[in-house]
Image: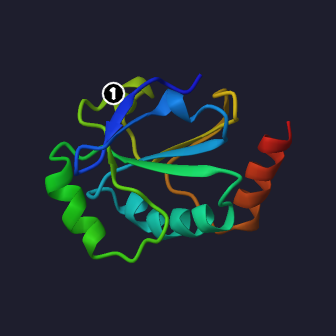
Amino acid sequence: LMPAVNLTDPHGKTLNLAALQGQPVLLNLWATWCAPCVLEMPMLDDLADGMKGRVRVVTVSQDLRGADTVEPFLANKDFRNLEPWLDPENELGMGYGDGNLPLTVLFDAQGQELFRVAGGYDWRSEEARAAIEEALAK
């Protein structure tokens, strides 16, 4: 099941992942120091735009310095759909194994994991969209 982890944004707003049940969620764990993560961010932003209303894309920074690192990084980007969620206790990174990034997990509307991708991935590809569509159709 999708973990009941509290995330924060740089301004103190909170989001409990478990509260997102009722809609499919593509959860991406990333960090500013992770080159494949940085490459994926624009692709995930485009994916979020193309699947708006069908899948919520939630990107969660695993940067240990939190907002001090993430806010300046995102300020230099032109993302339309990605929100700056932080995992201050690194609960997600620790809960999903060895801490290798990026890590992306698709959950269905009931919070059940459908698939995960460890490492960089081309989220703009037809293969990626087809995998998401197929997983959601189950």
Task: Examine the image and state in which quarter residue 83 appears.
Answer: bottom left
Quickly name the residue at label 1.
91
Identify the secondary structure beneath mark 1: helix
Residue 72 lies, in percent from the top left, at 19, 67
Question: Neighbour class for label 1 at 10 Å: few (<14), some, many (≥20)?
Answer: some
Q: Is residue 19 left or right of residue 126?
A: left
The image position of residue 109, as x and y in percent, is 69, 34
**Location of residue 7 in the rendering, given as x and y in whole percent from the top left corner:** 34, 37
What residue is rendered at 55% in x and 52% in y? 57
> Which residue lies at the image location 51% right of the left edge and 27% below the top edge?
18
118 in relation to 5, above or below: below
The quarter of the picture where the N terminus appears is top right
Residue 42 as seen in the image, left or right of residue 6: right
Quarter of the figure that contains the C terminus: top right
Quadrant in the picture for residue 128: bottom right
Is residue 122 at all visible to an observer of this figure? no
Q: How is the image coloured?
A: rainbow
45 or 131: nearer the eye?
45
